[in-house]
Image: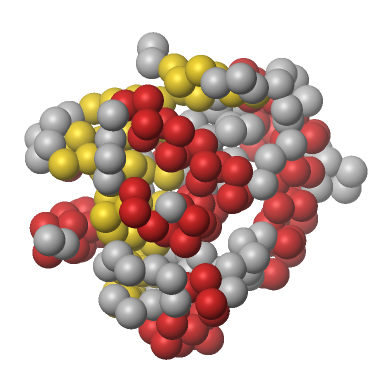
Amino acid sequence: MPYMKTEDLTMFYEDIGIGEPIIFIHGSLSRGITSFAAQIQAFQNTNRCIYPDLRGHGETESTNFNWIPSQLADDIIMLMDKLGIEKAHIVGHSMGGDIAMYSAVNHTDRVKSVTLMCSSGLLNEDAGKLLMRYNPDTIDMERYSGFIENMKKEHYAAHKGNWQNFLKQTIKNCMIYPDITNEDLQKITMPMMLIYGSNDTLVNAQDIKILAKNVRNFSSVRIEDTGHFPHILSQKYDEVNELIADFIASVK
């Protein structure tokens, strides 16, 4: 299995396909190949697809169990360096959209395009409130027993059994990040597209207006009758995949 090793990090990733590179960045409480199962087959014949497990998640190990989103964006750039990728298209779902936004702002010269899925890349207090149901201090252990067991299993390499800290760190970050300003957004030069579900409460009209006003090459597409995961196999993944493919193809 492929890993990128640094001083404090051993990042797990999958490197599938050939062609122009796309880095798929998963959201909170997920993993690369789990989150993007419906994209692997669709893009591997036309693109080199990278699916990392972010710091604090999945099979990625770190000596520091605490992390912030901008740090995760830096990790993505280090992974690109290791793989010899000068520029890449970045697709980020949910929190992965936040990481994509930090990459676009802080590493503009390394990002060819950004596809945000179900994330404006801006602070959304509703996300933190929604995750509070998983607060280890108050979680309904019986109701969420399956969820807890999955967190223990899927992310054991990352949290070494301390799933409570894993969840607390996730909730904490969602409460205060991303800390992207309008001035930051105005630095973005590459094309950016937002894909979101009509029933997704974590993307609001005001944030879309902010992006449209400040990002010079921004577009958005609303997927009807779906929520926060329009790209998964049980939802409208074909429509999402076509949107991503057409968008990437349009970027010169």
* Residue 13 percent coordinates (x, y): 40, 26
Residue 176 versus residue 40 in the image, above or below = below
What residue is drawn where x is 33% and y is 69%? 189
Image-quadrant location for residue 18? top left
* Residue 247 percent coordinates (x, y): 18, 63
What residue is drawn where x is 64% and y is 65%? 179
Q: Quadrant of the C terminus?
A: bottom left
Q: Is residue 241 left or right of residue 51?
A: left
Q: Nearer the viewer, residue 68 or 36?
A: 68
Residue 50 versus residue 215 in the image, above or below = above
Please say whether residue 111 is visible from this viewpoint.
yes
What residue is drawn where x is 43% and y is 39%? 77
Residue 109 versus residue 191 in the image, above or below = above
* Residue 84 percent coordinates (x, y): 28, 29
The colour mode here is secondary structure
* Residue 55 percent coordinates (x, y): 58, 33
What residue is drawn where x is 28% and y is 40%? 86
- View extreme (top): residue: 1
Q: Is residue 251 left or right of residue 193?
A: left
Q: Quadrant of the N terminus?
A: top left
Q: Nearer the viewer, residue 153 or 74?
A: 74
How many numbered marks, from 0 up?
0
Q: Nearer the viewer, residue 63 or 170?
A: 63
Image-quadrant location for residue 169? top right
